[in-house]
Image (cartoon, rainbow, N blue to C red):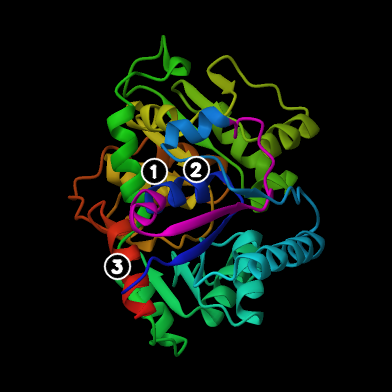
Amino acid sequence: MSKPLNIVAIVGARPQFIKAAAVSRVLRARHREVLVHTGQHYDANMSAVFFDELGIPPPDVNLAVGSANHGAQTGAMLAKIEAVLLAERPDWVLVYGDTNSTLAGALAAAKLRIPVAHVEAGLRSFNRAMPEEINRVVTDHISDLLLCPSETAVNNLAREGITRGVVLIGDVMADALRLAVERADVAAPEASGIQSGGYALVTVHRAENTDDPLRLRGILTGLTMLDMPVIFPAHPRARRAIAALGWTPPAHVRLIEPVGYPGMVALMRGARTILTDSGGVQKEAYWLGVPCVTLRDETEWVETVTHGWNILVGANPERIVAAARQPYPATSRPPLYGDGYAAERCVAALERAAG
């Protein structure tokens, strides 16, 4: 490769910034990157401090699209991303994960005949009712470089007839976690007064749980029934939904504000069990050796279930409690999803593809 690449990276939610931070460290050492924040998730915590924690500069462009219905939001992103791409004329557009920002970035690039690289390609829940599933399937089918976190993801793509441009790089979240653990040696202040290894950590943010009062009430009932302290950093969507139900947390459940990534890693490392509907947290729990209870009916990260470190419970209170009380798995934790150096493989794949 004779000259540095010009790359536009599209992100729109906190998990994507964490993934992008791992890749940007490597990418910006050799190439030009323009980081575009769609503004899909407005988050007051996403300040300069957030980016300092991740060790990356703030986004170069903020499209400030904000919340809306899926069609309106994706359409607004598509128009604004297209304008950025016409101005930048990048060699590649890099998209992450499965949000509306991912889909809009990939569509805008594909229509302008700009090559698309998809980080976390090939993941499937096989549940088309999930907006994320639609986003990831469509993105994969219009991408030129499919950067997969696991052999399962590679096989999923092959079953759909996608074999060209598929590269197994491992999971960039492992890179982000490796870097965050180095910064998480100071215990998160929200955990003070609670014995390490003696509490449950909870995250709930997916629409399938927050927008369904019956499911959300089932999850909250399960938390009420737990016989250990519960720390619940509550996403704004979850707080609004909880308030609408009129649920008052019992004494052992502590609702706190969302914390930065190193602080969240500290909370995860100190937990006895983690209850979540987040795909990223399922993997982080596995890597950190903390049993996970997934508040969904399916998962893209099937290997964590296969190896006994993750239990799918949906929103059933009794199943939530039973899973949280399970003893530590007797099975080992083979090194799934790479070794923490996926970002280097991601950039190397871009360089090879560029010729």
The x, y position of residue 148, in whole percent, is 37, 69
Residue 101 falls within the magenta-colored stretch: no
Q: Which residue position is annotated with label 3?
A: 348
Which label's residue is closer to the chain start, 2 or 1?
A: 2
Q: Which residue position is annotated with label 1?
A: 292
- Judged from the image, the secondary structure of the residue bearing numbered disc 2 is strand
Which label's residue is closer to the chain start, 3 or 2?
A: 2
Crowding around mark 2 (Cα neighbors within 10 Å: few <14, some 14 to 19, many 20+) is: many
- Judged from the image, the secondary structure of the residue bearing numbered disc 3 is helix
Label 3 vs label 2, nearer the camera: 3
- Residue type (three-letter) at the residue carrying disc 2: Thr
Pointers 2 and 1 in contact (C-beta within 8 Å): yes
Which label's residue is closer to the chain start, 1 or 3?
A: 1
Crowding around mark 3 (Cα neighbors within 10 Å: few <14, some 14 to 19, many 20+) is: some
Left or right of residue 25, residue 221 in this image? right
Farthest-out residue, bottom: 161
Q: Which segment did they paint magenta? A: 24-47
The structure residue drawn at horizontal position 70% and vertical position 68%, both measured from the top left corner, is 82
Left or right of residue 7, residue 28 in this image? left
In this view, the residue in front, 94 or 164, is 94
The structure residue drawn at horizontal position 29% and vertical position 67%, both measured from the top left corner, is 348
The structure residue drawn at horizontal position 54% and vertical position 69%, both measured from the top left corner, is 90
- Residue type (three-letter) at the residue carrying disc 1: Cys
One can see residue 337 in this view: no
